[in-house]
Image (tube, rainbow, N blue to C red):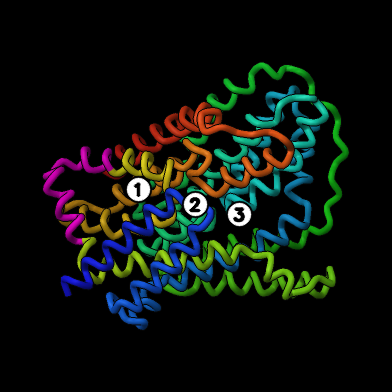
């Protein structure tokens, strides 16, 4: 058993190191590591399959399909262009676009949100002859922040929801207290001042833009219906074990059928376009973390941390938040959060406190910490790639110049909010 325990730890650490140095190969690395874990006998194939949270996977894949047809409906672009047209200056147009990106990201995966808004941002920059770099970076960090606000906003939220058995409505009120949504929104409100500082020099009036033609409102109706049903599902699946995933997959199937019948699209081609890379990555990470739990490493790590912090809840909470920020600035937040969720619960048990405080702090730190660097989150990588195609190179420090103050301004209010509400 000791041999298996060491193998699981070494493979996990090796995978993490490769995540840092080979971020574009993260899926290949994680899948290969998961195969090594199973083939070495650290965990059985049955245990590996059981380690995957299929409810979370259903939510992720189902919302991916819906997000894709929502983007193609042009409704988000339509709303963004109305905002640009009505804004009194370029500064406020950019701020409103960033806020709208954040709003979309609360219900649609972050990368999809950036892809939805990016064409509007680039077109605005071209018309006004301004550098689009800061605007695109503002869109990216706004999407990462708001993605943590709801259960379906981003994979880290889905991971937390699945692990802590939190329903869609639990992200608003949990155990009778204000929950994650309000902490995130408080941080978002404060972060607007940071974005205003960077865009304040753009006082010119925005030019009128041709309003995008909406192709169909049906995907928007589907998305709103999905949110309502997810909210109601908590009354029928109190353990958050299966129903949310089934609902999301069902809506994904409806979306694909609609695309086939109305737009004459190909279901096969639609499936090919989905983010199967991240899907495989998530499944492999579940297996890697499951091996650490089964071989006892999660309890050992939690015991070590409890010995360091003793009974000091504030020190433990503070360490979790700010270590999460630091790690997530350089490592994908999905494997980090997946590994730390059981550690946070085990640590809180050893300290004799409700795990909610540590879990919320972990989500905030891991989700927003990715905003510090261009490699900290997938949305950042996508935004920088779009800019590169347009001839704009974003350096590490150029991104951090916006990302670091934005992150600290967004995290600290949420960090204090959760401490006073949940301590």
Q: Which residue is depicted at the point 71% across and 58% down?
A: 70
Q: Earlier in the sequence, mark 2 or mark 3?
A: 2
Q: Which residue is mark 1?
A: 362
- Residue 286 higher or lower than 191, as above or below: below
Q: Which residue is depicted at the point 69% across and 73% down?
A: 254
For the stretch drawn in magenta, the main secondary structure is helix
Q: Which residue is mark 3?
A: 108
| Res. 23 mark | 2
| Res. 53 mark | none
Q: Position of residue 229 (x, y in %)?
A: 57, 66
Q: Position of residue 73 (x, y in %)?
A: 78, 57
Label 1 element class: helix
Q: Which residue is depicted at the point 70% across and 44% down?
A: 117
- Report the Cα–Cα distance between label 2 and label 3: 23 Å
Residue toward you, 87 or 42: 42
- Report the Cα–Cα distance between label 2 and label 1: 22 Å
């Amino acid at each position: 058993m000791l041999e298996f325990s060491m193998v699981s730890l070494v493979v996990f650490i090796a995978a993490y190191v490769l995540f840092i140095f080979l971020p574009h190969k993260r899926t290949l690395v994680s899948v290969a590591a998961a195969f090594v874990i199973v083939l070495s006998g650290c965990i059985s194939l049955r245990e590996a399959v059981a380690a995957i949270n299929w409810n979370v996977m259903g939510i992720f894949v189902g919302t991916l399909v819906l997000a894709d047809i929502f983007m193609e409906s042009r409704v988000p672009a339509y709303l963004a262009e109305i905002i640009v047209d009505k804004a009194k200056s370029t500064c406020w147009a950019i701020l409103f676009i960033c806020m709208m990106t954040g709003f979309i990201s609360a219900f649609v995966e972050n990368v999809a949100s950036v892809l939805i808004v990016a064409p509007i941002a680039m077109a605005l920059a071209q018309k006004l002859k301004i550098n689009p770099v800061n605007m695109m970076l503002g869109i990216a960090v706004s999407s990462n922040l708001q993605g943590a606000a709801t259960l379906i906003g981003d994979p880290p939220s889905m991971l937390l929801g699945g692990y802590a058995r939190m329903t869609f409505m639990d992200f608003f009120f949990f155990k009778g207290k204000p929950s994650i949504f309000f902490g995130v929104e408080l941080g978002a409100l404060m972060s607007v001042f940071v974005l205003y500082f960077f865009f304040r020099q753009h006082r010119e009036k925005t030019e009128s833009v041709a309003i995008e033609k909406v192709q169909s409102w049906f995907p928007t109706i589907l998305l709103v219906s999905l949110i309502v049903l997810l909210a109601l599902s908590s009354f029928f699946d109190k353990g958050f074990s299966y129903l949310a995933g089934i609902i999301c997959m069902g809506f994904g199937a409806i979306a694909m059928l609609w695309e086939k019948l109305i737009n004459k699209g190909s279901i096969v081609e639609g499936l090919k376009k989905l983010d199967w890379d991240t899907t495989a990555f998530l499944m492999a990470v579940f297996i890697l973390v499951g091996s650490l739990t089964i071989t006892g490493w999660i309890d050992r790590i939690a015991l070590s941390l409890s010995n360091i912090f003793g009974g000091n809840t504030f020190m433990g909470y503070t360490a979790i938040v700010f270590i999460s920020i630091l790690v997530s600035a350089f490592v994908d937040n999905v494997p980090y959060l997946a590994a730390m969720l059981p550690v946070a619960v085990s640590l809180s048990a050893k300290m004799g406190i409700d795990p909610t405080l540590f879990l919320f702090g972990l989500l905030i730190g891991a989700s927003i910490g990715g905003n510090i660097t261009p490699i900290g989150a997938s949305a950042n990588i996508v935004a920088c790639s779009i800019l590169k195609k347009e001839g704009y190179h974003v350096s590490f420090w150029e991104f951090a110049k916006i990302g670091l103050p934005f992150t600290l301004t967004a995290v600290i209010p949420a960090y204090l909010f959760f401490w006073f509400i949940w301590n």
